[in-house]
Amino acid sequence: MEEILRPNTTKEMKPPVINVGIIGWMRANLFNSWFNTTLTLIFTYLLYLTVPPFVEWAFINSNWISTSEECKASGGACWSVVTANIRFILFGFYPHALQWRPLLAIVILVLLLIYSQNRKHWRKSLGYAWAIGLFSMGLLLKGGLFGLESVDSTNWGGLPLTLLLSVFGLTAAYPVGIVLALGRQSKMPIIKSFCLVYIELIRGVPLISLLFMSSVVFPLFLPEGVSINPILRAQVAIIMFTAAYIAEVVRGGLQGVDRGQYEAAESLGLTYFQSMRRIILPQALKIVIPPSVGVLISAFKDTSLVVIIALYDLLKTTQTTLTDPKWMGSSTEAYIFVALIYFVCCFFMSNYSRKLEKELDTSL
């Protein structure tokens, strides 16, 4: 009875410092066995050998605003190749005095993407915003209306062209891929055969071959005097290629939906389109978010292949800059800059997919 009435004077015991925080995490993940300890020590030594020299080259001895001769004399990174040619790398041959227009188009696109991240904004108004935004972007790039000087598409290049090919290509490829996936599972032999042949044929050839066909072979079949914009031809090739891979990913999601969901839709008297739109596809697309984003990221990086058909995307403008004799020794710095742009875009897509996957997760 005394023990019950006696006040508890003992202090709350805290876990040892070595088991919590950074030290605890290191013990649990880096030094939890002799093998992991050995690997940790080896990689720490390799980082010691590589990181300090890289920091010294990239930041301490680097040149940001200088001539090529000063870069060569310093022995550090010559970031001046980027700062001195930034406008050409980002906008290509777009008229110098009008480069505010592609810059404004990029800003509009980025703002739309940031606003669209929040699922609470997924309403009809968002669709109207995208329609107005895309029209404004096209108007800014092309011109010809409202007093804007017209700029031929052959002068489009750099980052706006890369974003144009990727955003429009991925946006159009996804619904086409869904239609192909549904067609491959159709009970109509003609539709099923067509979708099957299309998917296997496109997936059986590299994107380079489709780009070459759109640029070299396809114009041979057009009537004399008729031509199609090369950017449009490349865009169609990217859409066709990406849609075939999306179709296989979506088909896997459709097969992952429990058969009882199909039977439940039929028991409710829903038509095929109603059941797919309201019951089957929402579940299937949620399942395939990770692989779908993987395909889209790969397709985004593949847009750099348009360089082989002489379209001046971000990679092509960078390569053209490096053909200048005074900047020939600075290719590493230029390609690091381009790689960072691609990394930021891909990281944004990957990070958003993880966020969307968590929001749509209904498992307990």
Image: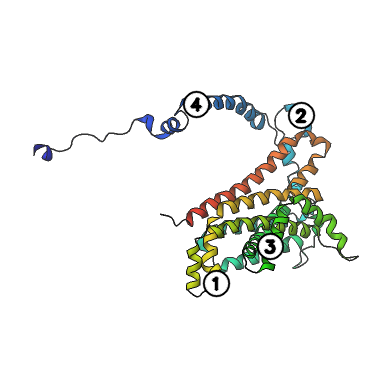
Q: Where does residue 228 sit, x and y in percent of width and height?
A: 82, 62
First of labels 3, 4 by sequence position? 4
Q: Please name which of the two marks, 3 or 4, marks the residue nearer to the observer.
A: 3
Q: Position of residue 361 (x, y in %)?
A: 47, 55
Label 1 close to label 4 by CB (< 8 Å):
no
Please tell me whether mark 1 sits on a helix, a strand or a loop: helix
In this view of the protein, which residue sits in the foreground, 162 or 61?
162
Q: Secondary structure at mark 2?
A: helix
Crowding at dot 2, Cα within 10 Å, few <14 / some 14-19 / many 20+, comes out as: some
Q: Does label 3 or label 2 sit earlier along the sequence? A: 2
Tell me if mark 3 has few (under 14), some (14-19) or many (20+) residues whose alpha carbon lies within 10 angstroms of its own: many
Q: Residue at x 53, y 70 (%)?
A: 275
Q: Give the image location of residue 319, x and y in percent.
A: 78, 42
Q: What's under tag 2, amino acid-wise?
A: Lys
Q: Nearer the viewer, mark 2 or mark 4?
A: 4
CA separation in Å, label 2 and label 4: 44 Å
* Left or right: 275, with 73 as reference point: left
Image depth: mark 1 or mark 3 in front: 3
50 displayed left or right of 143: left
Of all residues, the one furthest to the left in this rendering is: 1
Judge the density around disc 1: few (<14), some (14-19), many (≥20) Cα neighbours within 10 Å. Answer: few
Residue for badge 4: 35
Three-letter code for the amino acid on which mark 3 is drawn: Cys
The answer to whether 212 appears left or right of 333 in the picture is: right
Please indicate, yes or no, whether residue 28 appears anywhere in the rendered image. Answer: yes
Are the residues flagged by discs 2 and 1 in contact, CB closer than 8 Å? no
Question: Which residue position holds label 3?
Answer: 195
Q: Residue furthest bottom?
A: 269
Q: Which mark is residue 285?
A: none
Count of residue discs: 4
Per the image, the residue denoted by label 1 is 274
Marks 1/4: CA–CA distance: 56 Å
